[in-house]
Image (spheres, rainbow, N blue to C red):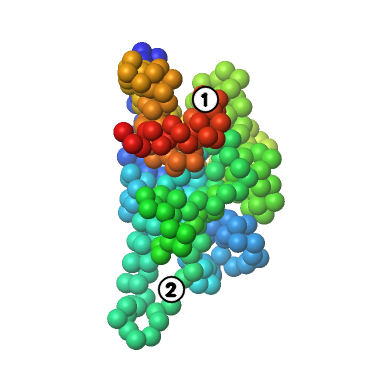
Amino acid sequence: MANIEEKKTKAQTRENNTGIYRNHKDGVAYKLFSGKKESLSLYNSIMKTEYADPDELEVVTLNSAIYIGRKNDNAIILHFNMLLTEFQTTFNPNMPLRTLIYVANEYEKYIAEHELNLYSEYIQEIPTPHFVTLYYGSKEQPEKQILKLSNAYKCKDESPELELMVTQYNVNPSYNEELKRRCPELDGYIKYVEKTRKYHRQGMTYEEAVKKSVDECIEEGILKEFFIKNKAEVISMTIFEYDEEEHMRLEREEQYRKGEACGEKRGIEIGEKKGRIFGAIGILKDLGMSESEIENQIRTKYKLNKDEIEKYFKEYTKQ
């Protein structure tokens, strides 16, 4: 517990010393892809198109905060296709629900700006939506997966009346290389992230690793103009994003530990192992994980087979 509090204090000190504040909304990826040229490059890469004129697209990223004070990273409309893209360093199974909230606001804005009449007897055409998450976190994830809104429904339905699917691409090194090749900005950004992680693992402070990575990218011609123009801001934003991610990780770690401790206490009545498992299930549910994700974590940690997992979940549900 003391170790966690010490890490939190260090993160807060770093935040104060670098002039970074919690109301800082923009991330490096958001800034990098805020221009039309870079947005078109990302669009062509994801949608597998070859459009050449950035002026054909419209950047529609909302300015207002939609989810925990953060903006969507990139949203554009091109030839009646709307592409919403998020960059994530932590896997989030709730992306479909977040996206549903965001796209509803997007359509509300679109309807007002184009004066669509929703009471008309004729269909009012709207852009076709496409939802993508680009994952570059440190934990293992598949190269590509589809996240569904229906996975969050308490009452499962084979044909849900409302569905929303988000395609998550893992863009870490050695994953989806063709996608990155088609978008030099994305490829350069991931190389920058990987350099920073490498130097941090080698023992540098995170600030030192970030500064060295920016300088090295400039020397090697990786996003050279972007880094030269925005060097100080990029360094501040990267450190802020790291602090924010580390803070959330420590909070989850602390909650998980409390859950296991609770399980141990209950173990006096229902058996130590069962108590630990029940405590773990409870806290993972509180963290918003899906049942399949919880099963995978519990199975790995306690070395259980499928039948044992199902038995524990049934018993937990009956409580």
Q: Is residue 194 above or below residue 106?
A: above
CA gap between label 1 and label 2 equals 47 Å
Place residue 274 in its image quadrant: top left
Which residue: 51% across, 68% down? 81
Query: Which part of the image, by quadrant, shows the C terminus?
Result: top left
**Callout 1 crowding tier (Cα within 10 Å): few <14, some 14–19, many ≥20:** few
Q: Which amino acid, by three-letter code, is at mark 2? A: Ile
Q: Is residue 8 visible?
A: no
Pick out the residue farthest to the top.
Answer: 2
Picture coordinates of residue 282, whole percent (x, y): 36, 32
Which residue: 56% across, 65% down? 54
Which residue: 54% across, 35% down? 306
Q: In this view, does 290 lie to the left or right of 182?
A: left
Element carrying mark 2? loop
Residue 126 has which mark? 2
Q: Nearer the viewer, mark 1 or mark 2?
A: 1
Residue 274 has which mark? none
Q: Is residue 142 left or right of residue 77?
A: right
**Callout 2 crowding tier (Cα within 10 Å): few <14, some 14–19, many ≥20:** some
* Nearer-the-camera pick, 166 or 228: 166
* Nearer-the-camera pick, 185 or 216: 185
Element carrying mark 1? helix
Place residue 62 in its image quadrant: bottom left
Residue at the disc numbered 1: 301
Q: Which amino acid, by three-letter code, is at mark 1? A: Lys
